[in-house]
Amino acid sequence: MSSKVDEYILKKGNWRAELELLRSVFSDLPVEETIKWGAPTYVFEGKNIVGLAAFKNYCGLWFFQGALLEDKQKVFINAQEGKTKAMLQWRFYSLKEIDINLIKEYILEAIENSKAGKEIKPKRNTKPIVIPEELKVAFLENEKLEAFFNEFTTSKQREFCEYILSAKRATTKQIRLEKITPMILNKVGLNDKYKNC
């Protein structure tokens, strides 16, 4: 068990009993407990199986490939309808709603699916990257900046561009350009700090 998960649960005081009970389901399962994206995550042979989290009004489990499960009890919801196809969520509003035997059945099915190689892969964004004018000007002024930008993956290039383009005011676009310029020159992606948390 991970001490970082202990810390996470302690910080979620009002959901502590529920989180500890949910966590106990994993204690004898063949999964590794870790923290990803700031929340407890359970991994089987390098594949994310289930995430655990608590919010203001509920706590829950996130099944990364939940759409592949039978869900005979109809416990799942898609918390990001239109954004995610594979990930489904199981919410709990009180301790008495948590049926650890049923939860374990779902987790074991998810592990079996992972063993069998079943996976819904996210669709890649194939839209062309739109480079903001502010960044084009910066490239003209600094060839090294453009060369380093071109070394990034398409998805990371898109993140930088959309970060600038999503700003409405010219001053905000300029501030964002000033923020990402040293990141590009240091070969650091915009969202790298959130990866492998």
Image (cartoon, helix red, strand yellow):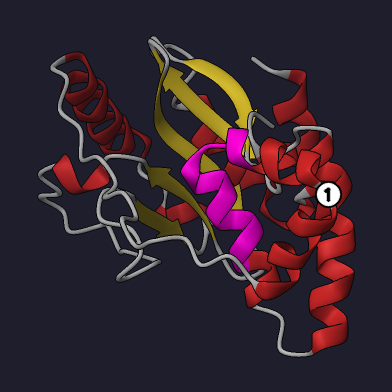
Q: Quadrant of the C terminus?
A: top right
Residue 143 found in image quarter:
top right
Q: Which residues are magenta?
A: 150-162
Query: Residue 125: image x %, image y %?
Result: 34, 55
Q: Is residue 155 rendered to the left or right of residue 173? A: left
Query: Residue 101: image x %, image y %?
Result: 30, 32
Which of 16/109 is in front? 109
Q: Residues within 10 Å of mark 1 (few under 14, many from 20)?
A: few
Q: Is residue 164 visible?
A: yes
Q: Quadrant of the N terminus?
A: top right
Residue farthest along the bottom direction in this orientation: 169
Q: Is residue 148 rendered to the left or right of residue 20? A: right
Q: Is residue 38 visible?
A: no
Which of 127/68 is in front? 127
The residue drawn where x is 78% and y is 90% is 169
Q: Dot 1 corresponds to which residue?
A: 142
Residue 40 found in image quarter:
top right
Which of 22/81 is in front? 81
Query: Residue 25: image x %, image y %?
Result: 44, 27
Examine the structure image and report whether residue 21 is included in the region drawn in magenta: no
| Disc 1, SS | loop
Query: Residue 186: image x %, image y %?
Result: 83, 33
The residue drawn where x is 58% and y is 65% is 131
What type is the residue that disc 1 sits on? Asn
The residue drawn where x is 33% and y is 58% is 84
Judged by its main secondary structure, the magenta piece is helix
Which of 16/106 is in front? 106
Give above or below for 83 relative to 101.
Answer: below
The residue drawn where x is 34% and y is 62% is 127
